[in-house]
Amino acid sequence: MYNDKKIAAIQARVNQEFLKLTPKSREQHEKSRGYWLRGVPMHWMVDWQCAYPLYIDRAQGVTMTDLDGNHYADFCLGDTGSMFGHSTPEIVEALTTQASRGITTMKPSRDAEAVGKLLTDIFGMAVWQVTATASDANRSIIRWCRAVTGRQKLLVFNQCYHGSVDETLVVHRPGGALGEADYDPILSMHGQEANGVALVEFNDLPSLRKILETGTVACILAEPIMTNVGMVLPDDGYWAEVRRLCTETGTLLIIDETHTISSGPGGHFRELGLKSDALVLGKPVAGGVPAGVYGVTAELAGRISDYFNRIGTTGRSGTSTTLSGSPFQLALMRKVLATSFTAATYAPMIAKAKGLEAGIKAIIAEFKAPWVVIRVGARVEFMCSPTPPHNGSEALKVIAQPIDTLIHAFLINHGVVITPFHNMMLISPVTTDTDVEKFLKAFRAVTKELME
């Protein structure tokens, strides 16, 4: 059975193995680090539990190849951005075709009607807008909710993640106080309660009801399943009651499907048979090309139109950027929505995820590891805890521990990459049985070493 001393000893060996396997990544990092914050183009690229990041030469399907020629089965897939695979033939074709026709124009393109219809047919929302990212989509819809309700307060769940939206980067402190998020202390806003943020624990209906009944909350922004601190599942009937409370109190419900789109082509909320007032999606909607969308019901669209008519504004609402809605984005979205957001695409993804889940459970049982496995659609998570968490606070206590760091680094040395921030794997349409077997072989090896 593992302990801190054993974990540290294995980690030291694994670190040395990584140095031997990746000298060209190390050399490239030394050359480039002086030009970038934390040595990388985006600061979270160092969050991979290694001495330096892997430098990737190419990514195709679910295989990444680094500068040293090492091949990796990718179960992170750009943290969902490449959920349908890296540089698939459909994406490459759409990219090259549209690149020769124009990138950005501030005008609608011939794909606009087709993309709008696809979005409505797939997700059920009446009207849509395109943004550069899901973060931008969240900012935009929060502003519309505040505008049409006349309320300022936003409600989010403790340890949530909705991109770089300032108001959502808050956490509970001891005693129930709101404070800056530990993972983004500089970017978080101070005095969140004064800025109109309410924070409750996921699955805590009494606390949620108490705040909503004040009649001060414009909207709830939430994932249907928390995915930022491992995966935290809703209690049975939880979302149906939240939906009822929102309707009763005049609170708008925004569901962020950016990660949970792996549950089905219409998102997790639609799989539950429920409907929100607004839906946000980013990352995979254009095959990894930066794009986000938000859609609203016909009723909310009418309220937004009334607001426009009342204030007499044109397009200057402060809810968009000049690169949003470009011909390039629309061309990619049209291709991806038509070819990947289908039941035929998702069925084998989910079937293979069930196989991965069963394989992990079998290894855990074989070595009597005190760990749990959670699967939602095509997404699988193992947590080094004997019981699944019920909310964000519970989840935070069991993720990003030394044992998780070791497992991630061990897997990388064995040619497997998973989501860096916790132990989550994503299955794509092009993930093969061989890829799954490669993961299970490496996972079994590290579990055996830890438990014996």
Image: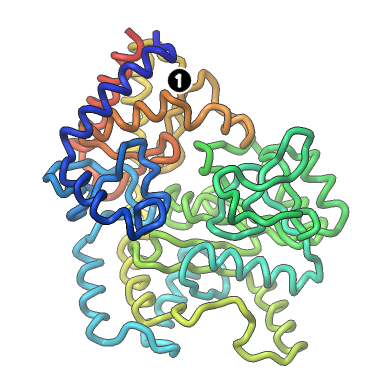
Dividing the picture into quadrants, the one containing residue 291 is bottom left
User: Between 82 and 27, which is closer to the camera in this rendering?
Assistant: 27
Q: Quadrant of the N terminus?
A: top left
Q: Secondary structure at mark 1?
A: loop
Q: Is residue 147 visible?
A: yes
State the image coordinates of residue 178 (x, y, percent, origin top left).
74, 45
Q: Which residue is mark 1?
A: 371
**Could you tell me which quadrant the C terminus lies in?**
top left
Up the image or down, 111 lies above or below 207; here it is below
Q: Give the percent coordinates (x, y) of residue 254.
A: 63, 59
Amino acid at the residue labelled 1: Trp
Position of residue 243 in the picture relative to residue 369 (left or right): right
Question: Image point 25% across, 80% down: which residue?
Answer: 99
Give the mark count.
1
Tell me residue 193's x, y (percent): 79, 53
From the viewer's side, name the closer residue of 163 and 437: 163
The residue depicted at 50 percent of the width and 70 percent of the height is 120
Identify the residue shown where x is 33% and y is 16%: 9
User: Depth check: 236 or 425 in front?
Assistant: 425
Q: Quadrant of residue 190?
A: bottom right
Colouring method of the image:
rainbow
Q: Would residue 310 appear left or right of 213 to someone viewing this image?
A: left
